[in-house]
Amino acid sequence: MLYRQVNEGCRAAYEHLMQSGLYASLTASGALVAHEEASLDLAAAPGACRILRPTRIPFVSYPYEWAFSALQDAALLTLDVHRQALEHGMVLKDASAYNVQLLRGRPVFIDTLSFDFYREGEPWVAYRQFCQHFLAPLALMAHVDERLGRLLREFIDGVPLDLASRLLPARTRLQFGLLTHLHLHAKGQARHADASAEVRAQRAASAKVSRTGMLGMIDSLAGAVRKLSWAPTGTEWGEYYSDTNYSDEAASRKQDLVGRLVARIKPATVWDLGGNTGVFARCALAAGAGFALSFDVDAAAVEKAWLTERKQPHGVTPLLLDLTNPSPALGWAHQERQSLAARGPADLVMALALVHHLAISNNVPLPRVADYLAELGRHVLIEFVPKSDSQVRRLLAAREDVFPDYTEAGFRAAFARRFDLVESAPIEGSERVLLLYSNKSAVGRGEQHG
Amino acid sequence: MKREKPILPCLLLVLVAQLAFVRDAQAYLDPGTGSLIIQTIIAAFVGTAFTAKLYWRRIKAYLSRDKNAVASTPTPPQEGDTDRG
């Protein structure tokens, strides 16, 4: 259970949020997470005036795991929440991307305590943070390389604007939004950085922005964000399922089989590792899973999955993940952002046609694959692809076969150390086999997740 | 990245049951002097542009004689609401 404590100092702002109609309007549209008030007895520290119990988000994901369009949607949501707050005499006092979560194809603002009173003339204190958390990474992804989104993993308070400005191509100076909010903004920061603390305090106190100016800033930032776009180049876009070893018939049989095995477990949470565009995560939901995540290392697949979910929400959250270097614990004392494993375990982890990539392309010994999956899931559903399969042959074509243990028997032996086999089922029309395992250790067993 | 002292310590994020520790999530944000100053300058431009945009929409709506559109177009800001900077 998650509780948040509102202290006396924030009572007035919280009450205004609740009584002005802002909370009702934001929660009705799904922009803000709803909460209930709980007993003050639950206060963890003195000075509490309210205890809130927000509706639980099934899985907390981080901006460095999002598709380009998901980060863009989160940016626009933040600006919209700020604009609506302004209409009710309030502002967002921070604009961190971590204040947004993804749920059913939409971003949701989760920080109920980010609202403060609007004071006429005051500039937006979260302007710099908005640019660092949203505009800079989006601009870098759109104008330089999508992979620069990973800078968010290194810079936990967003991409420094001087760095973004230096990395962006000169042509971005021709766009008013990027020229002002990134390039000039970075210059402005550098210009005032050397002043003494007193001088800076004086300058900051004299900075005034009218209400119209504030509305103009929101409009301008939203325009700059909307103008950015990223579409994967090359042939991969949209052709994921035309290049597999499955005939249509075998593919449909695989989906049926996955559905049947998922239904056997009745998982509340499913993590599909190597989930591609989310096809099998959706398949798991159709089979009765409560909530599904689809992880993939390919940003194009994650983008496509997000766009699909945004268009027609199924309940799949697509996330970018390199399983050979998964999201670590980050921030102060490694406690600000959780590692992937710390956010689990899932009731069911699916790894369909993934293990050969780990074992052969990335040299991970099969017992190590089993060990890590045993940390992540109470059950795992694996599709084993044998060496005779052309996909594996392709991986081995360019290198020496130093994987004598990569056989179905070797795989089963490696997994038997950590898992009990529940069922194995060959996929008709292919050489592959689906194996459903139950974790031998009590990884998070009995705990509530999701 | 700057981590300065909390300006307005007022919030506590409390994770009960799942996490054995209590995390302080003090509401603080260093807006950055340079960011504030540059914001006043940019806001002066974009505020004016924003007002002009709203008037322009009203004019276009009027010219197209679509009364519904006129009614639904937001009213541009009024009362000497000018920018400094």
Image: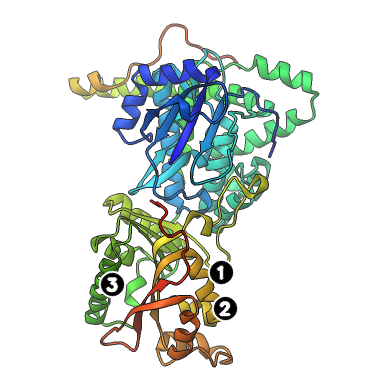
Q: In which chain is the residue bearing label 1?
A: A
Same chain, labels 3 and 2: yes
How far apart are the alpha carbons under marks 3 and 2? 26 Å
Q: Which mark is residue A261?
A: 3
Residue labelled with disc 1? A324
Q: Check disc 2 and give the amino acid type.
A: Val
Are there few (<14), some (14-19), or many (20+) residues within 10 Å of tag 1?
A: few
At which x and y percent is residue A59? 43, 50
Are there few (<14), some (14-19), or many (20+) residues within 10 Å of tag 3?
A: many
Q: Which mark is residue A364?
A: 2
Relative to A17, say whether A165 is above or below: below
Q: In which chain is the residue bearing label 2?
A: A
Residue at (35, 29) in percent of width and height: A26
Q: In which chain is the residue bearing label 3?
A: A
At which x and y percent is residue A6? 50, 25
At which x and y percent is residue A188? 68, 31
How far apart are the alpha carbons under marks 2 and 1? 9 Å
Q: Is residue A59 visible?
A: yes
Relative to B35, say whether A55 is above or below: below
Evaluate if marks 2 and 1 touch, with contact meaning CB atoms under 8 Å apart: yes
Evaluate if marks 1 and 3 touch, with contact meaning CB atoms under 8 Å apart: no
| Residue at the extreme top of the image, as rendered | B79
